């Protein structure tokens, strides 16, 4: 691990911020899947640490279909994406030439038969935050997917984002849909069919900043990044990328008042000018199959991945210009125990991340990279595909079998392990004293205040 260099100009760097954070109190909204500041942290909250099917359960609502996308919350609305499989019968008409008595062709006989396909209805669903009742469902696309998806994945793994006026629901190869808060589609944009590595499925989520929304389209065809006008859905700029498949979502940050879009991938970590699409800086890449999102706080960018290798890189964005590989703009690196699927949590000066897809937790000093503890086994978590969520000195980790709560800080301490009648790949969402968990079967709300 490199020694940290002195940080420069930290005081004049602004926090990563999107337009959705300007319109409503950050403490009462969860406008994007990694929380108000894209760090995996609820800015305030005190949800229960012990909960179950019969403990601190405020409500539980069955959600139609399958979707691993983490919900978002705005006001009294919880927004989820789902793909509902339905059987659809198609009648196929055929005609066949028949010869007459003299052997001459000319008569045609009509034939018909039917076939049944398992198509998917791609839905945006609004749930009442107080009662758990489904307010509305909107099917934005209905089709038989051309691609396959991983057995552990879903056709609705891309989380939506909101600016408080509109919902931006992204279904990858189905396109990006802008809806109002009542479920009416305002516009949509379709880029065709992705070709994901080994049919592992899709999962990158869009990033929102004021009147711009950014989509990252990394796959085994021609990869690109594109920025659209949120009002019209028209493309503002589009840049080709020399990358294969990745699942990481773009991150938008302001540096000295200038917004830039940061992407993490196998060949390069890159920053684009949000206005023009020009590359501001780039660095060496991560491992294969990059999934964890970049995160940013106090002037430092953190990028990591953990498939067929380990990589964690921290970058001083005040000094990042051009090719920064091997320069002092890279503050320190830590190449052990990094995550494959889960994103990290950055809270109160500490960086937390899980090893691969397993329940082994590491905590580093976020500024210096000093190891506080590493690869601590989280009891009750054997495999995990969601990302942890932090608040008020606690970290909530939703494994496939259990949800564990860890005490935040420089020493490892398990607070509780909670069993539920469900499986979880979506990440926990925390709003005030309420904890929301989206399982394979249902959406849960837990609170000590019933």
Image: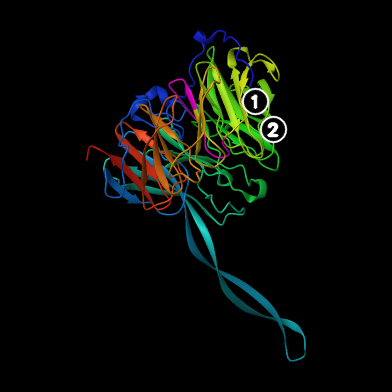
Question: Where residue 275 sits: x, y (%)?
Answer: 59, 21
Q: Residue furthest right?
A: 103
Secondary element under disc 1, as helix, strand or loop, is: strand
Secondary element under disc 2, as helix, strand or loop, is: strand
Q: Do we see residue 182 in this rendering?
A: no
Query: In this picture, is 337 found above or below 120?
Result: above
Question: Where residue 439 sits: x, y (%)?
Answer: 41, 48
| Magenta span main SS | loop
Magenta-colored stretch includes residue 341: yes
Question: Where residue 145 sits: x, y (%)?
Answer: 58, 54
Magenta-colored stretch includes residue 348: yes
The residue sitting at 56% across, 54% down in the picture is: 151
Badge 1 vs badge 2, beta-carbon distance below 8 Å: yes
Q: Nearer the viewer, residue 61 or 238?
A: 61
The quadrant the N terminus occupies is top right
The mark closer to the camera, 1 or 2, is 1
Q: Residue 79: which numbered mark, if any?
A: none
Whole-angstrom CA distance, mark 1 to mark 2, is 10 Å
Q: Residue furthest bottom?
A: 101
The image quarter containing residue 251 is top right
Q: Residue furthest left?
A: 450
Residue interval drawn in magenta: 339-351
Q: Which residue is mark 1?
A: 270
Query: In this picture, is 123 found above or below 218?
Result: below
Q: Nearer the viewer, residue 50 or 448?
A: 50
The residue sitting at 50% across, 16% down in the picture is: 298
The image quarter containing residue 97 is bottom right
């Amino acid at each position: 691990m490199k020694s940290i260099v002195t940080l420069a100009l930290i005081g004049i760097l602004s926090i990563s911020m999107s337009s959705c954070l300007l319109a409503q109190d950050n403490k009462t909204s969860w406008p994007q899947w990694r929380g108000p500041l894209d760090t995996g942290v609820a800015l305030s909250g005190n949800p229960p640490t012990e909960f179950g099917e019969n403990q601190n359960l405020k409500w539980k609502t069955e959600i139609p279909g399958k979707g691993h996308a983490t919900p978002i919350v705005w006001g009294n609305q919880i927004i989820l994406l789902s793909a509902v499989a339905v059987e659809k019968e198609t009648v196929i008409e055929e005609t066949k030439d028949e010869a007459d008595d003299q052997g001459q062709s000319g008569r045609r006989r009509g034939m018909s038969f039917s076939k049944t396909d398992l198509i998917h209805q791609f839905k945006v669903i609004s749930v009442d935050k107080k009662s758990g009742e489904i307010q509305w469902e909107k099917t934005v696309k209905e089709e038989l997917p051309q691609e396959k998806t991983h057995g552990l994945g879903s056709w609705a793994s891309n989380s939506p984002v909101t600016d408080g006026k509109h919902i931006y629901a992204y279904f990858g190869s189905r396109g990006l849909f802008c809806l109002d808060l009542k479920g009416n589609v305002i516009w949509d944009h379709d880029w065709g069919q992705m070709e994901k590595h080994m049919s592992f499925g899709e999962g990158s989520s869009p990033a929102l900043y004021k009147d711009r929304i950014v989509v990252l389209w990394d796959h085994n065809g021609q990869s690109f990044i594109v920025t659209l006008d949120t009002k019209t859905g028209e493309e503002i700029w589009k840049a080709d990328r020399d990358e294969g498949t990745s699942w990481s979502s773009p991150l938008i940050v302001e540096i000295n008042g200038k917004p830039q879009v940061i992407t993490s991938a196998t060949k390069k970590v890159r920053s684009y000018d949000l206005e023009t699409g020009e590359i501001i800086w780039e660095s060496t890449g991560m491992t294969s199959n990059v999934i964890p999102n970049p995160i940013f706080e106090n002037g430092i960018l953190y990028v990591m991945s953990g498939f067929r290798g380990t990589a964690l890189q921290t970058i001083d964005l005040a000094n990042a210009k051009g090719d920064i590989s091997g320069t002092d703009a890279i503050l320190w690196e830590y190449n052990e125990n990094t995550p494959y699927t889960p994103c990290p949590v950055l809270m109160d000066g500490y960086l937390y991340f899980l090893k691969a897809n397993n329940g082994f937790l590491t905590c580093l000093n976020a500024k210096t990279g000093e190891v506080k503890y590493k690869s601590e086994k989280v009891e009750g978590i054997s495999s995990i595909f969601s990302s942890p969520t932090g608040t008020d000195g606690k970290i909530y980790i939703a494994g496939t079998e259990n949800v564990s709560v860890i005490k935040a800080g420089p020493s490892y301490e398990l607070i509780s392990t909670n069993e539920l009648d469900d499986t979880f790949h979506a990440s926990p969402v925390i709003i005030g004293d309420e904890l929301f968990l989206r399982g394979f079967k249902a959406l849960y709300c837990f609170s000590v205040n019933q």
